[in-house]
Amino acid sequence: MKQLTINIPDNLYASVVELFKHIPKVTIQEEADFEIPEWQKKIVRERVKKFKKNPKKVFTQKQVDKLVKLG
């Protein structure tokens, strides 16, 4: 048996799941939306503040320029 992972738009989800339910021997494993814990968000926010205060301390100027360009 093969395994398939697909990403589909929210508006098509129910239709696609219903379609697969009618195929013999097919199992559907749904994953809940992933949520980032607040404690982890806090750590990242603190790191971003430190970076904005002194980006050269963490990265080379070339790396900073690339990060700024990426937005």
Image: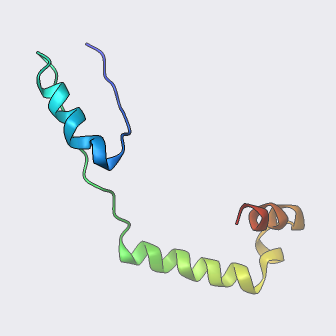
Q: Look at the image and tell me whether residue 38 can be seen.
A: yes
Locate residue 40, reporting x and y percent: 43, 72
- Look at the image and name its color scheme: rainbow
Toward the right, the furthest residue is: 61
Taking the spot 36% from the left edge, 40% from the top edge, the residue there is: 8
Instruction: In the rendered view, tell whether residue 40 sits above or below residue 49.
Output: above
* Quarter in which the N terminus is drawn: top left
Q: Position of residue 49 (x, y in %)?
A: 64, 84
Q: Which residue reaches farthest top? A: 1
Residue 46's place in the image compared with 15, above or below, is below
> Horizontal and vertical percent for residue 26?
16, 21
Q: Is residue 31 above or below residue 23?
A: below
Residue closer to the observer: 36 or 28: 28
**Image-quadrant location for residue 16:** top left
68 left or right of 39? right
Residue appearing at x 88%, y 68% in the figure: 61
**Rendered location of residue 37, percent (x, y):** 35, 71
Q: Residue at image x 76%, y 72%?
A: 58
Which quarter of the rendering shows the C terminus? bottom right
Residue 29 appears in the rendering: no
* Relative to 57, 61 lies left or right: right
The mark total stands at 0
Left or right of 70 on screen, residue 43: left
Q: Quadrant of residue 28?
A: top left
